Amino acid sequence: MRQIWLGANAVFRESVRDRVPYSIVVFAVLMIAASYLISQLSAGQDIKIIKDLGLAALSMFGLLIAVFIGVGLVTKEVEKRSVYGLLTKPLSRAQFLLGKYAGLVMTLAVNLSVMTLALYAVLFYSTYSASAGLRASWEAPGVDPRMLIAIVLIFAELMLVTALALFFSTFSSPLWATLLTLGLWVAGHFNSDLRNFGTVVDSAPAIWLARVIYYVIPNLAPFDVKAEVVHGIDVAARHVALTVAYAGLYISILLTASVTVFGRRDFK
Amino acid sequence: MPAIETEGLTKDFLVGFWRPRPYRALDALTLSVETGEVFGFLGPNGAGKSTTLKLLMQLIFPSGGSARILGSPVGDVSVRRRIGFLAENPYYYDYLTAEELLTYFARLFGYSSPDARIRVTRVLDQVGLGSERRLRLRQFSKGMVQRVGLAQALLNDPEVVFLDEPMSGLDPLGRRAVRDLILSLRARGCTVFFSSHILSDAEALCDRVAIVAQGKLAAAGRLDELLAFELQGWELVMSDVPAALHAQLASRFATVTPLSHGRVAVTLAADAEPDRVMASLSADGARIESLNPIRHTLEDLFIQRVRDSQPRAVTL
């Protein structure tokens, strides 16, 4: 556990010193702030636009960090051969990989926290600068703690995407790993359609194949509750618990597969 | 117990994109390195030296055979607490300072923070980077990174040190420092296994050497056993050679080599009685500059064994 923690710390330190995640977070914060200006264009809908754009920024910029840094975690080490220095220390390949994963999850957590604070700051300002009449017309409070549910699920989704990026990077090039991760992220958001494939197609093999794909690729649609929280619709605690549990299971499978593949790899 | 043992260690790589074929990078290497030895692992570029070191460090997995370090299989992670490794042309995280990198590595060995700090200071001073400890590695020259590599290989007071081309990228002063370091490691009983294609280093440092060529072991043993120390002949250098004597040299000696400033080098057979030859040459008007015995060098052996080695097999 100590070795994993040391590895995670090193990844976190790298991300703190690397300008890329910084720039992404700064850009996201700017975008959240800009959502306030955009919201001024549509009277009555302004708070919803800020929440919508803010959560979308959190999700998209978090995705960029998860994919691009996640893919680089292993491939960069192997390409630059810095992996030689680490793997000849008392550190197993599994510990190396899990440390990388934990480090990026820590980085994501910090970055999401910064973006969340920025979003709540804009919401706070918008709420207290709005008239009482306007506030009364909103479907949900301006500074709504239920937004945190959406953010928790975004974080869980990003943890899963990071595990995907890490898995692909254990055996493919950075470009392939990026394309495969982004491809699965897109497919994962439309995965629910595959479940109902039988209603539009008659072919039994096609339906069977769709079912297999449905169960294999990650189902990311349940992680997206942005619309619900923006409109003040309650998200059931059971849904959140099951979705987080699903993420945990999927991440465990991906990390096990990553450790297995990485454990057999030759570093030429 | 030997510090390092390999038994039929073999590695095949697949080469070619469309029709991958096996390429034997290392062919049934059997070696044993005793505790406390400085062992030179020699060979031309592409002979299989780095492949062997990567197999010993389990950075790649063997296609056949086995290897043990300090009695444990190379796959045993715990044995890495007792060894140090320097890769060829090492690269480390350039966003870290030398001190931070080594502290991170020291913590991986299980040392507490204060202990790690003491060790890091000691090894950085040992490799001459004490005053650059707080510089980021991206500001380091190639030679300085090589020194950081040496420092990280010594952090844990290893019982066995593996060095892959340790002199690579170093200036003459740096090379001298590495030589001194290897000798100091030997003095404290550490086993040093180093690969090199620089034979003078091996000749100066090693108790025993192995030569690999085309992935196969071409020779192994003590230097004094491998190199026949019997006399091969004499090299005699003279100057002020009169024209009449100059004309006779080719018929009297096996080789005649003109040198700068009118000097001439000739080769005498081992049983040529050099005193008599020098007296005769002096009587003919030449001035004798020097006389040196000719013996086999490691370079001669190396070239002979590399030339003798068969082309590499592409088999499975």
Image (spheres, coloured by chain):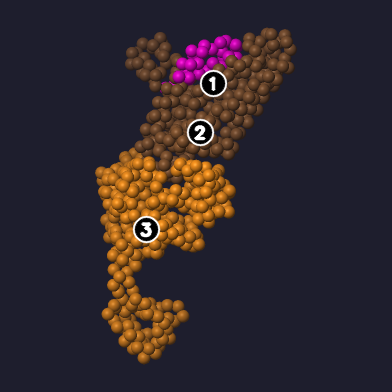
Q: Which residues are magenta?
A: A217-245
> Label 2 sits on what residue type?
Gly
Q: Choose the circle earlier in sequence order: 2 or 1.
A: 2
Q: Is residue B154 above or below residue A173?
A: below
- In depth, the one of A57 and B20 nearer the eye is A57
Q: CA distance from mark 3 to mark 1?
A: 58 Å
- In depth, the one of A203 and B195 nearer the eye is B195
Question: Disc 3 marks which residue?
Answer: B38
Q: Are marks 3 and 1 in contact (CB under 8 Å)?
A: no
Question: Disc 2 marks which residue?
Answer: A103
Q: CA distance from mark 2 to mark 1?
A: 18 Å
> Label 3 sits on what residue type?
Val
Q: Is residue B232 above or below residue B137?
A: below
The hue used for chain B is: orange
Residue under the image location 52 percent in, 20 percent down:
A153
Label 1's element?
A: helix
- In depth, the one of B68 and B23 nearer the eye is B68
How packed mark 2 is, by other alpha carbons closer than 10 Å (few <14, some 14-19, many 20 or more), is many
Question: Disc 1 marks which residue?
Answer: A152
User: Where's residue B194, x and y in %?
Assistant: 39, 55
